[in-house]
Image (spheres, rainbow, N blue to C red):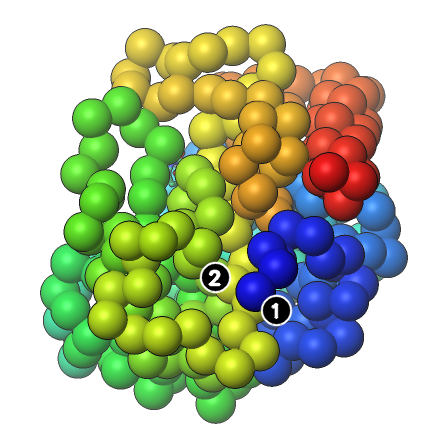
């Protein structure tokens, strides 16, 4: 089997069995960007401002909605309108980690009603397959997609080896809902990740990778940064996730500086992808 990394985002989009993954890959091809901007700010106005400034340059905006102090339904409506205007998908980085019945409620209900507005969300496999059954019961009918955290970027994290392999195997049991992984490398192509479940016909996992920075190697709290080239070309991942490297931390840099950083990361990510296709 040739590696998925030899294929263009466009050809993968054309053949993808999960509609929201198709939408993301089409968007990446159309906008020539594999950049996901992570907007980790605590004020509604800052979140909307940064999403609006970054929108033209990215394929995805990732949120942590529970850190926003002045959250309201209008925030979600405005974010959806910005996503329509600039053509990107929304990913609420909720990192679900409970039993099926609980995550089903956390995903659909409460103040945030994540499933109503977020195209993608993510989960840990710690509770076993029940978490996937619970999340899929809400997300699949709405056309949403899930990423499993098969690996993490932080120093000393426990998502390694057999645990990573089990994430790949579990993803293969939910082929209509699990569209990819948060991972540091092409975990679906590792020898050890067969995990007892063979790759599905036409399987195509999108690997989205945090811990990306061009100017820094870490943050003093465990985060570890690699360059877009290391992530996309060397490690075969599909999307770079950049947070503080773009918005600068705190309440965010001025718009012109955000735009400048978006252009820089977008260019680096896309060049790495073009190089990978030539390898
Ligand atoms: O392993 C991970 C998984 C995730 S989703 N490591 C991460 O850093 N993340 C998220 O990516 C994290 O929650 C944060 O929102 C973002 C990285 O932000 P940055 O400012 O360090 O680029």
Q: Nearer the viewer, residue 245 or 118?
A: 245
Q: Position of residue 119 (x, y in %)?
A: 56, 67
Residue at 47%, 61% (x, y): give it. 180
First of labels 1, 2 by sequence position: 1
State the image coordinates of residue 102 (x, y, percent, origin top left): 17, 73
Name the outermost residue toward the front. 1
Q: Position of residue 94 (x, y in %)?
A: 35, 54
* Quarter of the image with the C terminus in it: top right
- Rendering quarter of residue 189: bottom left
From the viewer's perspective, is residue 175 above or below residue 64?
Answer: below
View quadrant of ligand 1: top left
* Residue at 59% from the left image edge and 56% from the top image edge: 3
Q: Quadrant of residue 227?
A: top right
- Disc number placed over residue 21 in the picture, else none: 1
Alpha carbon distance from label 1 to label 2: 8 Å
Residue corresponding to mark 2: 180
């Amino acid at each position: 089997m040739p590696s998925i990394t030899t294929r263009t985002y466009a050809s993968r989009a054309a053949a993808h069995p999960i509609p929201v993954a198709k939408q993301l890959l089409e968007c990446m091809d159309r906008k020539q960007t594999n950049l996901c901007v992570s907007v980790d700010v605590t004020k509604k106005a800052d979140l909307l401002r940064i999403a609006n400034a970054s929108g033209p340059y990215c394929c995805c905006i990732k949120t942590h909605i529970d850190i926003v102090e002045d959250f309201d339904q209008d925030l979600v409506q405005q974010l959806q309108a910005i996503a329509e205007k600039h053509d990107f998908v929304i990913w609420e980085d909720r990192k679900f980690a409970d039993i099926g019945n609980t995550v089903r409620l956390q995903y659909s209900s409460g103040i945030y009603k994540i499933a109503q507005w977020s195209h993608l969300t993510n989960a840990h496999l710690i509770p076993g397959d029940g978490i996937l059954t619970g999340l899929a019961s809400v997300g699949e009918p709405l056309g949403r997609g899930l990423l499993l955290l098969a690996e993490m970027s932080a120093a000393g994290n426990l998502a390694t080896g057999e645990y990573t392999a089990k994430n790949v195997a579990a993803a293969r049991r939910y082929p209509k809902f699990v569209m990819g992984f948060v991972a540091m490398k092409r975990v679906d192509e590792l020898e050890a990740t067969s995990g007892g479940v063979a790759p599905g016909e036409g399987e195509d996992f999108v690997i989205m990778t945090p811990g990306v920075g061009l100017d820094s190697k870490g943050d003093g709290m465990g985060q570890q940064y690699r360059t877009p080239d290391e992530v996309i070309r060397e490690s075969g991942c599909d999307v770079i996730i950049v947070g503080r490297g773009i918005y600068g931390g705190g309440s965010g840099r001025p718009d012109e500086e955000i735009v400048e950083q978006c252009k820089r990361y977008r260019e680096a990510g896309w060049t790495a992808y073009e190089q990978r296709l030539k390898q």
